[in-house]
Each structure stands twice: as C-alpha cells, then as structure tokens.
Image: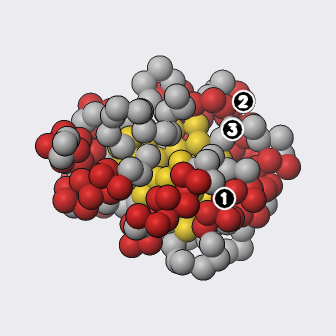
C-alpha cells in the first residue's frame, strides 16, 4: 500500500497544508514539525526557484506576504533569502523563522513523514523548476517518499522529461478541463480536486481510472467526515489534529 492511498480498513490520509499552517507560519520547518506532532500522515509544501536555481519553500511568487522581503522570490539567491524573516508576519512570537530550502525540508522529513511537493505554476512557468526539484529529490534520497504535484500539466511533463521518477499528481480547481482524464493521460497516481468539485461520481471515476483522490483544503470536521465516507484517499488541511479527531469520531 502506497502512502498516498487510504489503507483498506483505515480513514483517509491527512496531509498538512503548508505544514500545520492554521497554527504557525506556513511553509516553515516549525510548521512541518508541528504537523508531525499533531498526527499528520504527510506534509504539503510549495516550491519556487531562487535566483541561483535552488528550490525554496514558499507559497507566493513574491516575498511580500510571508517574509520581511519584497519582490519576486526568483530575484534573490538562497543566501539572501535566508536572511529574511519568515515568521514575524504571523506574530512577534514567530520572529526569526527562516524560509527553508526544499533540501532542508526533505532532510528534516526523512524518517518522519512523506512530502507532497507542489511545483508552483504562477505564470510565467519556470521551466527550470521541475529539473531542479528532481535533483534535490535525488540528492536527499527522497524520490520514493515524495509526491510531486501541480496545477500545470506542462510542469509535470517537464518533471518527467528531466528524468523525474517520483509519483506525480494533478491538481484541479475547476470542472474543466476534466481532471481525471488529465491525470490519467499524465500517468499520475493521484487526482487532486478542490473540495467544491468532489462528489460521489468524481470519487467513482477516480477509482475506475485507478487513481487516488486527494482533496484540498478542508478545515471543517463535518466536511472531512463526509469526504471520508465517500472514500477519498487523502484530505489536505491547515489543522491536522482537528481532522484526525473528526475522522476518529466519524468511524462507522
Ligand atoms: O494541495 C493543494 C493546495 O495546496 C493548492 O492550493 O494555493 O494552497 O497552494 P494552494
Ligand atoms: Ca500548495
């Protein structure tokens, strides 16, 4: 049984969205550590490239919202990015947190949790990102413990073209284009729809196509219980402990 599929007798996997981002600053080592402590089955993180070509873990294309920096992530080197504060925006108690590289996150995750890595696809797509991520996956020997996901099929194709062998998953926000067909055509192991797209029919279509189904982003316990009853494989949340409790309480 692969880690992204629900176990035969168990509940859906719980994936911590940007770490335990409901509690502490997203996409930081603290957020991933907290997710681990709160019982997540896996962590999700977002990656962009630095000016010197290293994948770094941050959600936005620009630094403004979540760090003390300004402008595009891609304008600064890793050494420059590491000088920024990535915690104070959530409160003074988090001041001093740093923006991690993907390599640091994977080194931390080894022996702890699998990692879902989202290749961010804000236009223009960075064609060098998939190959750089694959290089880090190999250097850290985490190829088999990661799922590489994106909204952009061309970035997932570029990951394969760069030699990337890790499992991949396609994210979808809208009913069109068809997510299940798109994921199947890419050779993905998972389709990852926005929660508003998920119903019994979509779950059945994913199963018929041999795909896992991972749903994002769900913080409401009752919605999580409904999705679990529908048979989804994974649920991404900002509050892994809340969902763990909800899925336990929802056991039939
Ligand atoms: O896991 C999917 C989800 O993370 C996609 O949305 O904006 O949080 O990266 P976003
Ligand atoms: Ca993401």
Residue carrying label 3: 166
Q: Earlier in the sequence, mark 2 or mark 3?
A: 2
Q: How is the image coloured?
A: secondary structure
Tell whether label 3 touches label 2 (CB within 8 Å).
no
Nearest-to-viewer mark from 2 and 3 = 3
- Residue 138 - label: 2
Report the residue that reaches farthest toward the top: 111
Mark-to-mark CA distance, 2 and 1: 24 Å
Q: Is residue 66 above or below residue 245?
A: below
In the structure shown, which secondary structural element does the residue marked by tag 2 occupy? Answer: helix
Q: Nearer the viewer, mark 2 or mark 1?
A: 1
Quadrant of residue 124 within the rendered picture: bottom right
Would you say the beta carbon of the disc 1 residue lies within 8 angstroms of ligand 1?
Answer: no
Q: Position of residue 208 (x, y in %)?
A: 59, 54
Q: Which mark is residue 183?
A: 1
Q: Residues within 10 Å of mark 2 (few under 14, many from 20)?
A: some
Element class at badge 3? loop
Percent coordinates x, y for residue 212 in the rendering: 53, 48
Residue at left offset 42%, top offset 24%: 112
Q: Nearer the viewer, mark 3 or mark 1?
A: 1
Name which of mark 2 and mark 1 comes first in the sequence: 2
Residue 202 visible in image: yes
Indicate which disc residue 136 carries: none
- Residue 232 locus on image (x, y percent): 41, 51
Residue name at image x 55 percent, y 61 percent: 205
Could you say which is closer to the camera, residue 97 or residue 18? 18
Foreground: 229 or 46?
229
Image side of residue 112 versus residue 129, left or right: left
């Amino acid at each position: 049984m692969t880690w992204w599929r629900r176990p035969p007798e168990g509940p859906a996997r719980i994936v911590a969205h940007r770490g335990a981002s409901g509690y502490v600053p997203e996409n930081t080592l603290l957020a991933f550590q907290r997710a681990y402590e709160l019982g997540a089955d896996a962590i999700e993180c977002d990656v962009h490239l630095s000016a010197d070509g290293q994948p770094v873990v941050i959600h936005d294309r620009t630094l403004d919202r979540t760090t003390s920096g300004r402008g595009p992530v891609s304008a600064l080197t890793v050494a420059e990015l590491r000088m920024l504060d990535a915690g104070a925006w959530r409160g003074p108690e988090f001041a001093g947190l740093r923006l991690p590289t993907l390599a640091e996150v994977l080194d931390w995750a080894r022996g702890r949790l699998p990692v879902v890595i989202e290749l961010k696809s804000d236009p223009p797509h960075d064609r060098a990102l998939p190959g750089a991520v694959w290089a880090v996956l190999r250097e850290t020997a985490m190829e088999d413990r990661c799922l590489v996901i994106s909204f952009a099929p061309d970035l997932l194709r570029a990951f394969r073209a760069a030699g990337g062998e890790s499992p991949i998953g396609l994210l979808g926000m809208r009913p069109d284009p068809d997510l299940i067909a798109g994921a199947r055509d890419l050779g993905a192991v998972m389709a990852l729809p926005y929660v508003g797209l998920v119903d019994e029919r979509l779950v059945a279509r994913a199963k018929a196509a041999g795909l896992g189904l991972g749903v994002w982003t769900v913080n409401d316990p009752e919605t999580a219980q409904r999705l679990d009853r529908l048979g989804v494989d994974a649920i991404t949340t900002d509050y892994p402990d809340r969902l763990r409790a909800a899925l336990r309480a929802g056991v039939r």
